[in-house]
Image (cartoon, rainbow, N blue to C red):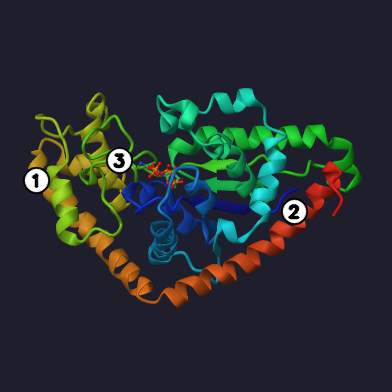
């Protein structure tokens, strides 16, 4: 195999992590630690593509790190760090800004959603976000990226950047001894019954940190009462639950809650419907509230314990950044040689 198997992924410290971040990505990150060499990042440079209050950003970086650790990331096994501590992310992103084409970025739906109607007023960083994301991944020459469904398009762009770089500099890359190209064609890992967790208030919108309504999401910092209340208030329809998955078609809110239950209980949607199908939503919601509290309360307690010791969290980030820098510097040295930049 030409490329060593390596996993990279990250989350933005733009607020509290929520159940979507947890089930869509974090659960898979934890599992992959047993089978892969993993690099997990708090992508703080991505966060500042939209305005962040500086004091809140610093707290959020520590909170997201604490959530990673509480969810089961082991900083001895995996590299855990924050992006801005490793300057090579920005360096490689600049090279990729010069490789990616405007037409590619113009197609990115996340930019359109986040910039909204006032596109002229969006930051250049928000527009170039996918190039920084490609740099995050390819700096570690990662072969696998566990993410939620919403990141699929950005992963495709990462592959396009890798391919164009490998083609544009083919003679230099071959001369440097990389017969199969310098960057791998990274594979997204989008798996599990909750790759796209939807808002609890509107089944057509994904659960998001930036949703104005806190009732739209379950935060990993919510206590048991808040979790139970949010589940019980979640939007549903008047029909009872179906007994088979086909019956969830066109019922996005019901489908979402069943998917969440399946993911939290590590069972299939079929098995969940076999148990709750035909019953009232209120019964199912009570069971879901109990399950969510049972699963998330220990995580919440661990997060609080970790945040009470910011020195420990900062130590994890510092140690992770030192280890990340070793890999990043080696990649960047090769990139400079290949592109023709003196170092
Ligand atoms: N609703 C979701 N369902 C499943 N996976 C999700 N992810 C995010 N929302 C869902 C996955 O979580 C990882 C980290 O995402 P991010 O923090 O980089 O940014 P995001 O996708 O922009 O998340 P948010 O919550 O929607 O933040 P805001 O509101 O700031 O934009 C990614 O793997 C993502 O797929």
Mark nearest the camera among 3 and 2 is 3
**Which of the marked residues, 2 or 1, is nearer the chain's N terminus?**
1
Task: Give the mark nearest the N terminus, 3 or 2.
Answer: 3
Instruction: State the residue at coordinates (21%, 39%).
Output: 273
Label 2, residues with CA under 10 Å away: few <14, some 14-19, many ≥20:
some
At x 25%, y 24%, the residue is: 250
Q: Which mark is residue 283?
A: 1
- Find ligand 1 in the image and state its quadrant: top left
Q: Ligand 1 within 8 A of label 3's CB?
A: yes
- Tell me the residue at 88%/48% (across/down): 176
Residue 128 image point, x, y percent = 58, 36
Task: Choose mark 3 or mark 1, whichever is in front.
Answer: 3
Ranked by sequence position, the earlier of labels 3 and 1 is: 3
Horizontal placement of 154 versus 30: left or right? Answer: right
Identify the residue under disc 3: 211
Q: Is residue 36 visible?
A: no
Q: Quadrant of the C terminus?
A: bottom right
């Amino acid at each position: 195999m030409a490329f060593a198997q390596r996993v990279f992924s990250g989350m933005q410290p733009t607020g509290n992590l929520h159940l979507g971040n947890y089930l869509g990505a974090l659960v898979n990150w934890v599992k992959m630690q047993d089978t892969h060499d993993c690099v997990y990042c708090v992508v703080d440079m991505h966060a500042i593509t939209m305005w962040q209050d500086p004091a809140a950003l610093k707290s959020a970086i520590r909170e997201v790190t604490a959530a990673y650790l509480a969810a089961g990331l082991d900083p001895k096994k995996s590299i855990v760090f924050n992006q801005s501590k490793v300057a090579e992310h920005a360096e490689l992103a600049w090279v990729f800004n010069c490789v990616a084409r405007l037409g590619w970025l113009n197609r990115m739906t996340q930019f359109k959603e986040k910039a909204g109607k006032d596109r002229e007023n969006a930051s250049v960083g928000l527009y170039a976000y996918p190039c920084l994301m490609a740099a995050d991944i390819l700096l570690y020459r990662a072969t696998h990226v566990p993410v939620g469904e919403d990141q699929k398009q950005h992963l495709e762009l990462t592959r396009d950047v890798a391919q164009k770089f490998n083609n544009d500099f083919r003679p230099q890359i071959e001369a440097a001894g990389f017969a199969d190209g310098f960057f791998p064609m990274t594979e997204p890992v989008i798996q599990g019954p909750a790759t796209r967790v939807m808002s609890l208030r509107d089944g057509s919108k994904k659960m998001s940190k930036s949703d104005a309504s806190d009732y739209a999401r379950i935060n990993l910092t919510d206590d048991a009462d808040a979790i139970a209340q949010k589940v019980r208030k979640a939007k549903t329809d008047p029909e009872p639950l179906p007994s088979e998955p086909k019956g969830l078609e066109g019922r996005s809110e019901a489908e979402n809650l069943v998917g969440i239950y399946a993911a939290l209980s590590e069972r299939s949607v079929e098995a969940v419907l076999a148990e709750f199908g035909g019953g009232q939503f209120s019964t199912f919601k009570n069971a879901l509230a109990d399950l969510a509290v049972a699963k998330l309360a220990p995580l919440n307690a661990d997060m609080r314990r970790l945040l009470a010791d910011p020195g420990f969290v900062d130590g994890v980030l510092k140690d992770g950044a030192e280890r990340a820098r070793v890999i990043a510097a080696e990649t960047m040295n090769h990139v400079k040689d290949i592109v023709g930049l003196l170092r």
